[in-house]
Amino acid sequence: MGLIKRGELASWLSREQGAEDIRIFLFFGERYLCREAADLVQQALLAQGGGMVHGIDGDQEDASRTLGQLMNFSLLPGRQLYRVTDSRLFHSRAVAGEIWNKAVAAQEAGRSGPARMQLMILAGLVDLKAGESLADRDADQWQELLGFAKPSGDLAWTDRLLAEGGGPSGGKGEAAANISDRYLAALAKGLPGQNYLLLSAENVDKRKALFTVIKKHGLVVDCFVETKSSSSAAQNEQKGVLRELAQKTLVSFHKKMEPRALDMLFERVGFHPVALVMELEKLALFALDRPLISCADVDSMVGRTREDALFTLTEAFGNGNLALTLVILGRLLENGIHDLAILATMRNYIRKMLIFRSLQLLASPPWQRGMQAKAFQEVYLPALKEKGEWAELLKAHPYALYMGFKKAEEFSCPLLKEWMALLLRAEYQMKGSPLPPTLFLEELLLAMVSKKEGGAV
């Protein structure tokens, strides 16, 4: 009983007592890893005596009904496992920022469904009433309601998605507090018969009493993986998790994979465990009787990630190749990349170029046109980091930074500022016009390339 890391779960399950002496489990962190850990516990519990799994979707769950089933004796034979995925029992305003970030990421990726789901969770969490606007809150109201600073930009999309989802129902904050208290009282009595509760949640507030009680009387499995940090420790942890999942998947298909092919797959998929497993399964089936999956297989079967595809757009644009830029734009839109995600990519690219170009204009450290990579990495970049400005931006790989600085010297600051103004105007037009976004994006790129004259200053 207590809290363990996901990597310790197999060893914990193999102990002499097994899992049967624990009646309630909580898995929190990365969604796929939570599911995998819950599968292990489920298999262990059903291995002796059998039983039944009652799967419950937390997004659609009536928590009162689940509790009622859990606290009644079942007429069914064997162990009764009530398995709730995406439980909201551990949500609080403390995790509102994490939920908001997921909503924004989904919206920028053009995935309105997941974005709407996260906003509905957020609305219920802060007890937003029907008809109330989230976007119209001023900075102070937003901070008071959600507990973090109001983001800049047009947030009208939040109200639109909430309305499409039926709008916030309100009153959920009080209901959530009430159901938590009822769960605490029920767990104090103990679960009847052979009932077990398996909960999983991406975001949890560890300060909630329910979390503390489960940690004391049940088992909490930490499946969290740091994805926001660019530190070597975080990167190594992510790669370790991906390699572990890859090994398990390949063994299940009796396949092996060229080391370079595996690296290619990691680069294209990124840290998305469920996507990695799905792509590996696809590659294993594609290989048929061949025992080894090659780089050619990866090239044939695994598409470039959204980030890679967007990178090809900025690369073509930065090189001034208007024809290729427009072709890539068309392909991105055809493949479902949201127009606002493309706009955000262009904004980030121009902003980065403007920062790099501004740093090059500083008297110290001096930037020299045509600077070689060695001098950049050994002299210029360390001196720049010592100034302490734009520290987060300068954490990227030195060679990637060098190539970025090389590209930035081709532009002037006035040109980059003008591009930013054009982009802002296009964004307002796209959000307020019934015309297809493609027209505004094409017009924007044409205007930007046409203004690229005079070179760097």
Image (tube, rainbow, N blue to C red):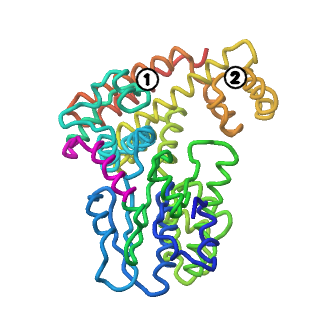
Q: Is 146 displayed left or right of 158 in the figure?
A: right
Q: Which residues are magenta?
A: 164-185
- Main SS of the magenta part reads helix
Q: Residue 450 got which mark?
A: 1
Q: Is residue 347 visible?
A: yes
User: Is residue 12 shown above or below 105?
Assistant: below
Residue behind mark 2: 388
Q: Is 90 displayed left or right of 415 in the figure?
A: left
Q: Quadrant of residue 339?
A: top left
Which residue is rendered at x = 56% and y = 42% of the image? Answer: 228
Mark 2: amino acid: Gly
Q: Nearer the viewer, residue 240 or 8?
A: 8
User: Is residue 71 shown above or below 150?
Assistant: below
Which secondary structure lies at badge 2?
loop
Which residue is rendered at x = 60% and y = 18% of the image? Answer: 456
Mark 2 touches mark 1? (CB < 8 Å): no
Which residue is rendered at x = 80% and y = 30% of the image? Answer: 375
Q: Nearer the viewer, residue 192 or 70?
A: 192
Q: Nearer the viewer, residue 289 or 173?
A: 173
